[in-house]
Amino acid sequence: MSTSDDLSPSERYADYRAGRKHPVLRDFRTLYDFPLDDFQVRGCQAIEEGRGVLVAAPTGSGKTIVGEFAIHLALETGRKAFYTTPIKALSNQKYHDLVVRYGPERVGLLTGDNVVNGEAPIVVMTTEVLRNMLYAGSRTLLGLGFVVMDEVHYLADRSRGAVWEEVIIHLPESVSLISLSATVSNAEEFGEWLATVRGDTTTIVEERRPVPLYQHVMVGRRLLDLFASSDVDAAAGFVKEGAPVNDALLKVARDDWASSRIRDRRNPRGRSKPGQKNVGNGRRVWIPSRPDVIDRLDREGLLPAIVFIFSRVGCDAAVTQCLNAGVRLTTPEERDTIFAYVEDACGDLPAEDLHVLGYHDFLDGLTRGVAAHHAGMLPAFKQCVEELFVRGLCKVVFATETLALGINMPARTVVIEKLTKWNGETHADITPGEYTQLTGRAGRRGLDTEGHGVVLWQPGMNPRELAGLASTRTYPLRSSFRPSYNMAVNLVHQFGRSRSRELLEQSFAQFQADKAVVGLARQLRKSEDALAGYREAATCHLGDFMEYADLRRRIGEAEKGASRARRADRREEAIESLRALRPGDVIEVPTGKFAGFAVVVDPGWSPEGPRPYVVTADRQARRLAMIDFPTPVTALARLRIPKNFNGRNPQMRRDLASALRSRTHDLTPPPPGRSSGAGGARGGRRDPVRTDPVRTDADDVIAQLRAQLRAHPCHDCPEREDHARWAERYFKLDRDAHTLKRRVEQRTNTVARQFDRVCEVLTALGYLDEDTVTERGSHLRRLYSDMDLLAAESMRQGLWDDLSPSELAAALAVLVFEARRPDDATSPRLPGGRVREVIGEMVRLWGSLETLERDHKLEFLRPPDLGFAWVAYRWAEGDELDDVLLVSDLAAGDFVRWMKQLLDLAGQVADAAGASPLRETARELIRTMRRGVVAYSSLADDE
């Protein structure tokens, strides 16, 4: 931190004034050996002045200092502070950081499955834990003065984002909220919403990175700049939208494109004459291997690096490739330090599990300076990688995108292998927001003067699209909020249904919908003003011209309706006539490319419509469609079709066509406009050329309207057509205004309407009775799973009452597990006996609940996934980790994560069951399953 000796007299005086106004901040700044940035100072000042704060800043900019000041202020003023994070790994990391500063007696940790000093003045927790505390009215909330919500942009997450909004809405008014977000383009809008629900809130947006970021593309062995050196901002490491692309990179793209066109356009099928060479003047780009990439980065001094691969298998394979290539990035002293740290950190892992966990390969990679990092790894292994990387001992980490979510692991360089990733349904391009989040890890504040983002060249890459990704600054925060069943029963229990509805209308989702409505409402008001002007312009001195214009409009609509009805009748008649056709019928095709005489080979009738297969007089064999028959047809004659007729045989077609021409030589085609069978059995059919069509009710209505029109006073107005033009504009604009009105109504109170539908489902099941949560619904209040309603109904119907702990584990696994891809869940193995029947009953129960949801236009409950039931059952039965992983094909990290979620749900079931045998079964299940790697991972789980 700069001393007062470095400041001018005026700056020293301003510093003195600021220190007197913000004494706690003045003391806080002495804790750091570097000066705080302006945005950090402004955020801390706002907190000390009693305001809420939203800080939106790039990754690695130091926005957490603002949150740490809120904790410091809480301790100085004798209040509590909660620090919430989206994932348990980040909670653990923050807990350890705060323990180092304030000591273990003043810091606690709550992550669902861990309670460490929960009544301490500073408590770090996951956001879900705070939400549950608010609904339960926990006494831990007493004396709470500040809540820091780290990574608050997580509220856009589709599966968990609603929790952030629940916390923001339900926190007591006396609590100051400090929200820390990545850079989003609508931070001001988010801050405006926070001000409406939390009171005075200061929004601070910092767009400039603390360390400049240089963007590169690795093309073969060359490392090319992405942006042209002529761009001043890009040359300084701060890119703006529309920055020009490096010409050398564009040349590479042109050569790559040319090399892909290896066939002469004049010879598209690739057939070449003897001695002829394929055309193509471009050069293919050599794609370096992963060890080659690491070697190049090492020689350029760009390590440590994070290489994002977007595939767990790819991350593990990358480490193996580096080991096979003999990559070694550490000194002997660093290897000894790494070895000692890993041995100590993993010393409590059961020795018999080390082989199946891949511990020795993991240790070998780390001692060489390379490691993987993904959700399939054991949490203890990930913790080792994170710590050693931060300490600069691990030089390269191959990671999936989950590493970019909040874990404090900055690097000098970030490498992105490909610009596409699997999103659960398909391989999709990464978004500008995701690209910024990933490359935001590059550049360690205080260690690096610059950061580097490197994208590996791939065939077909477009440098301009990449430049757009790297320079775009438009990635808005969108709410994913929607009321759940658990949320509904908790809200109604605390506030009643009407007040709950009002609270939900305060959500960011509704705020954004309402802001969209503002623009639509403005358009609607303009339309209404214009309608009044059009009505005035259509005024007639003889009478009410709008009434007259309405008669004209109704006549036009009636005539169009009658015309449509006639066409529909005609089509039905045509279909019926085609249905009556038989093989050998000679018909006249009324229109189209194959109009004229034809013989039916196959009538081609199907429920979708007739598709007759015919041979025409000019030897064409074709299957026709309804478009070829605007009018009905009848058989004019008959021909014999050979039994073995094949329309692909030219000789057979010629013979049949010749017979057709002979048979139709003396037939006269029907007059234009008439069908082939006009005047036949269908003589009563309406025909457009007949002058005496059958009168219908529509004709009578039209005649009546025309009589009213002629009798109207405005009919004889000399300016009638001028008035009519204004009236036509009025009716057109009126239609548009009605469409706008519907759109406004659809967006208004959308969250509240969905809440009403949720309450209707709960009322139908007997969980709610007006403003009261029934005894049946009280179980649901303690079930926070996304399958909350199915769990509550299973409990209510007693499906789990007679299960053993192992069998209950299998049943609960059905509710927590989700296969990474749908095809991962094929043919699941299930334990036998009573639990197999129970799981079947749960699946049937889900079917009935899904029907109930559909009736109320809801879609919350996903199908139960049986893929983890056998694994959970065997683990609860005491099987070894090696045996369990062998039958499951799960990675160790995935196994631990699903076990943690299963234990979390078992704890909720125990709480919801009350004084019943099910409670004891659930608690016994928890004791049984919390062993080995599952027990060891308690402080290192990541989700």
Image: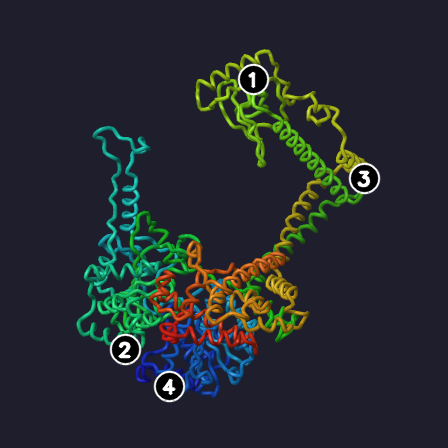
Q: Amino acid at mark 4?
A: Gly
Q: Amino acid at mark 2?
A: Asp
In this rendering, is residue 324 above or below 722?
below
Q: Amino acid at mark 1?
A: Leu
Q: Earlier in the sequence, mark 3 or mark 1?
A: 1
Q: CA distance from mark 2 to mark 3?
A: 99 Å
Mark in front: 2 vs 3 = 2
Pick the front one: 584 or 58: 584
Pick the front one: 24 or 810: 810
Q: CA distance from mark 1 to mark 2?
A: 93 Å
| Residue tagged 4 | 103
**Residue 519 screen position, x and y as percent:** 58, 58
The quadrant where residue 293 appears: bottom left
Q: CA distance from mark 2 to mark 4?
A: 23 Å
**Residue 489 screen position, x and y as percent:** 60, 71
User: Is the residue under label 4 in contact with that under label 3 (CB below 8 Å)?
Assistant: no
Mark in front: 1 vs 2 = 1
Q: Earlier in the sequence, mark 2 or mark 4?
A: 4
Q: CA distance from mark 3 to mark 1?
A: 62 Å
Pick the front one: 45 or 504: 504
| Residue tagged 3 | 712
Q: Amino acid at mark 3?
A: His
Q: CA distance from mark 4 to mark 1?
A: 101 Å
Dot 2 crowding, Cα within 10 Å, few <14, some 14–19, many 20+: few
Q: Earlier in the sequence, mark 3 or mark 4?
A: 4
Dot 1 crowding, Cα within 10 Å, few <14, some 14–19, many 20+: some
Q: Earlier in the sequence, mark 4 or mark 1?
A: 4
**Residue 624 screen position, x and y as percent:** 54, 28
